[in-house]
Amino acid sequence: MTLSAPADHSDRERTRARIAEVLARARRRTRVLTDSVDEADLVAQHSPLMSPLVWDLAHIGNQEELWLVRDVGGRDAVRADIDELYDAFKHARVNRPALPLLNPAQARGYVGSVREKVLDVLDTADLDGGPLVHEGFAFGMIAQHEQQHDETMLATHQLRRGAPVLSAPPAPAAPVPVGGEVVIAAGDFLMGTTADPWALDNERPAHPVHVPGFAIDVAPVTNAQYAAFIADGGYDRPELWSERGWAHRCTAGLVAPQFWERDGDRWYRTAFGVRAPLRPQQPVVHVCWFEAEAYARWAGKRLPTEAEWEKAARFDPATGDSRRYPWGAGAPDEHTANLGQRHLEPAEVGAYPAGVSATGVHQLIGDVWEWCSSSFEAYPGFRAFPYREYSEVFFGGDYRILRGGSFGTDEVACRGTFRNWDHPIRRQIFAGFRLARDLREDER
Ligand code: AVJ
Ligand code: FE
């Protein structure tokens, strides 16, 4: 046995404690999402776009078993016979209800036994070992995986019909309304990360990017602004839409964001089974990338590129450094960002003055995922780790970048470098957008 410095020892023990805490938080949320509905709701398919909740539940356990019990722990399989059922690449979501899935009681028992073994593995895992466990990476990856599926299950709850089963306090109002835009001067910034221990493969490595000067909106587009686009005939003017966007608008019959309903001259929205008047100052949510693109053209602007979004979120002009979050290095809390399903809706624009970026941009983290103009591509120097199916197989596909997380994203799966992606027609996710534009000659 070797003696290590006490500081190293306590660092490792702190990492172990943090891992136990994030795994427990993810599991509490998984239980809220799966214990709040009855058995019929757990096995039902609430939308062809979504898995039955009971599939997500056992899939969470299966990924945890594959990586932490078998790979990191070197232990025997808990259930070697079900890997194929819960392999997302083997069965499309639409086909999952017909599979011989574990029933709710079996799925709960399964995730419980896996977790018990994982906590045992965690006790003795060498957190200075190889790349998979270095600084607890695999545990962090699995906590992020569970939270990502929790957000997916939250979207399933939003699609579910019937009486409300989830509740949360309303998201905060803004002390002062915010709007307008900020100018970010041309220059390099460091995009992505090499050092963040739990950053996923697609966020790596850190690399300098030159970003021409641009203006970006201080806040995401609000319900009131989006309603003005609709009132101005936004959905009836093909010239505002790209060719693909207009074709989709027509075949899908889009006339407003998903879950909006007009009643006379007022708009209502239904969220998690509760119908209520739209709050005008909240960011619009449940719009697809094509709708965002049309709105931007109507407003005379465009969506930000992914690099512009990240520069606005991370770049500190005073030091030239890229921060983990808009406000700095400190973990998000209830004063800086609307994350973690603390509320079941986005907060009014301006509700988080403590979360503002160094460049003066609000609510980049939390509230709504923000569509960017960019497709999902590898950063220079990308290496798939630890498996190609997390990111690499999606590069070059028909996906658009989403940044910043939503009210339904947990902090462990959210930071200035975190990259999400989806098809440009999807709108069951908690996505909105903000606008950007090139600088005019006199602004450069
Ligand atoms: C990164 C949110 C697009 O849900 O498809 C979950 C995350 N990957 N299980 C998804 C993920 C494998 C992924 N997104
Ligand atoms: Fe998954």
Image (cartoon, rainbow, N blue to C red):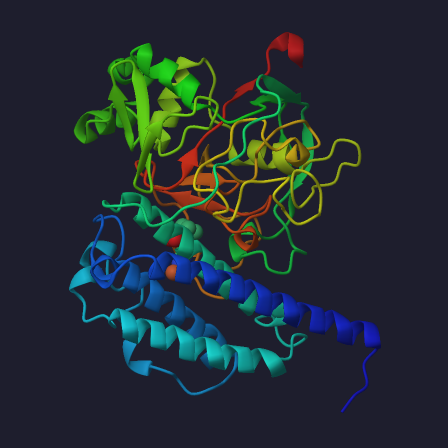
Q: Quadrant of ligand 2?
A: bottom left
User: Which of the image's four quarters has the C terminus?
Assistant: top right
Q: Quadrant of residue 20?
A: bottom right
Whether 212 is drawn above or below 147: the answer is above
Q: Quadrant of the N terminus?
A: bottom right
In this view, the residue in front, 129 or 76, is: 76
List the single residue furthest toward the top: 442
> In this view, which residue lies farthest toward the left?
98
Residue at position x 66%, y 50% in the image: 331
Please provide percent x and percent y for residue 91. 24, 62
Kindly identify the residue that appears in the image at 76 percent across and 36 percent down: 320
Location of residue 413 with respect to 428 vertically, above or below: below
Residue 204 shown left or right of residue 435 in the figure: right
User: Where residue 383 sits in the image (x, y, percent)?
Assistant: 53, 59
Residue 324 as seen in the image, left or right of residue 424 = right
Q: Nearer the viewer, residue 83 or 307?
A: 83
Residue at the image point whose x is 63% and y is 22% from the top: 213
Residue 94 location, quadrant: bottom left
**Residue 394 in sight in this render:** no
- Where 191 sits versus 130, above or below? above
Q: Position of residue 89 (x, y in %)?
A: 30, 61
